[in-house]
Image: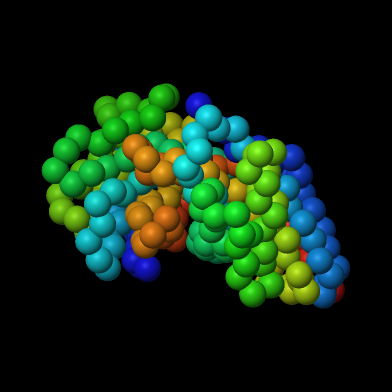
C-alpha cells in the first residue's frame, strides 16, 4: 500500500498567521483526504482533493479557511489560514492505498498561541 | 447520513486476555466497507482489519477478528492474547462502496492493556 510523508510533524504558530501542511505519496493516487482531529476526539473530514479539480469541502469547512492544492497525483497541501487557538488540532492526510484500504500520514500537531 | 457509534469510550484488558470493542453503524446502503483503525500515541493511523459488507465470512488478521452482523449493523473487534503494544485508540470506520470514498469514523475507544 501507499506510504505518505507528512510535514511538518508539529508546529507552534501565532494567531492570525497561516500554516501549510504537505503530504507526499510514494505512488499515484486519485483521491486524497484531509482530516482534523481535535484533542481527544475522532477524525473529522475537512475535504476531499482530486487532482485537477477543486477540492470538495465538508459541511462546516470552507475554502477560504482551509485552501487545498493538488497539483499532481502524488502531492497535496492544506493551508490553515488566519489561525486562532480553536484551530489547534492534529491534521492528517490520507489516500486510498489499495482495494478498500487507506493510508494515513503521521499527522501534524498544530498549536496556535 | 451514515453514522458510526462506538459506545465504549475506554476499555481495559489484562495482558494475554481477550477483549471485544463494540461498533454499530447506520446506513441505508447495501454495499460498503467497514474498518478498524488503531492510533497509538505516535498518531499514526494503522489499519487493523477490513470487512466488505457483501462477504458473510468474518475477517480475521492474526489475533484480530471481527463479528460482523449486517442485519444488526454491528461490527465488533475481538483482540485475542492481548499484548502491551495493543494499547491505543481504536476507531471504527465506514465507507460506502460507491460515490465518495470518504471514511466516516466513530469517536474511538481507548484500550489500556495491563501487565
Q: Using the image, determine if residue A65 lies above or below residue A18.
A: above
User: Considering only vertical position in the picture, is A112 above or below B44?
Assistant: above
Residue A64 picture location, percent across and down: 27, 27
Q: Is residue B20 left or right of residue A81?
A: right
Q: Is residue B51 visible?
A: yes
Which quarter of the figure has residue B23? Answer: top right
Name the foreground residue: A22 vs A94. Answer: A94
How many discs appear? 0
Residue B49 in the image: state x and y as whole percent.
57, 61
Residue A88 is left or right of residue B108, and the answer is left
* Residue for point 32% across, 26% down: A62
Residue drawn where x is 83% and y is 63% of the image: B13
Residue A65 can be seen in this image: no
**Residue sitting nearer the eye, B20 or A15:** B20
The colour scheme used to paint the residues is: rainbow
- Quadrant position of the C terminus of chain B in the picture: bottom right
User: In the shown orientation, is residue A73 left or right of residue B72?
Assistant: left
Which residue is found at the position 73% from the left and 65% from the top?
B79
The location of residue B3, given as percent across then percent down, is 57, 33
Q: Quadrant of residue B36?
A: bottom right
Q: Nearer the viewer, residue A83 or B105?
A: B105
Rendered location of residue B44, percent (x, y): 50, 61
Q: Residue at x 67, y 58 (%)?
A: B66
Amino acid at each position: 500500500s501507499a506510504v505518505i510523508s507528512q510535514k511538518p510533524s508539529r508546529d507552534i504558530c501565532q494567531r492570525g498567521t497561516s500554516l501549510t501542511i504537505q503530504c507526499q505519496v510514494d505512488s499515484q493516487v486519485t483521491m486524497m483526504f484531509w482530516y482534523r482531529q481535535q484533542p481527544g476526539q475522532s477524525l473529522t473530514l475537512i475535504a476531499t482533493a482530486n487532482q485537477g479539480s477543486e477540492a470538495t469541502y465538508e459541511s462546516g469547512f470552507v475554502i477560504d479557511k482551509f485552501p487545498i492544492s493538488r497539483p499532481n497525483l502524488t502531492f497535496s497541501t492544506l493551508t490553515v489560514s488566519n489561525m486562532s487557538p480553536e484551530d489547534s488540532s492534529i491534521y492528517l492526510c490520507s489516500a486510498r492505498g489499495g482495494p478498500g484500504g487507506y493510508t494515513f500520514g503521521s499527522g501534524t500537531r498544530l498549536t496556535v498561541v | 447520513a451514515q453514522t458510526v457509534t462506538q459506545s465504549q469510550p475506554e476499555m481495559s484488558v489484562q495482558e494475554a486476555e481477550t477483549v471485544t470493542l463494540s461498533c454499530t453503524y447506520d446506513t441505508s446502503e447495501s454495499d460498503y466497507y467497514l474498518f478498524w483503525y488503531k492510533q497509538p500515541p505516535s498518531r499514526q493511523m494503522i489499519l487493523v482489519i477490513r470487512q466488505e459488507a457483501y462477504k458473510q465470512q468474518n475477517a480475521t488478521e492474526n489475533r484480530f477478528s471481527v463479528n460482523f452482523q449486517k442485519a444488526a449493523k454491528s461490527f465488533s473487534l475481538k483482540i485475542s492474547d492481548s499484548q502491551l503494544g495493543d494499547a491505543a485508540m481504536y476507531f471504527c470506520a465506514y465507507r460506502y462502496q460507491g460515490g465518495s470514498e470518504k471514511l466516516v469514523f466513530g469517536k474511538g475507544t481507548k484500550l489500556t492493556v495491563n501487565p
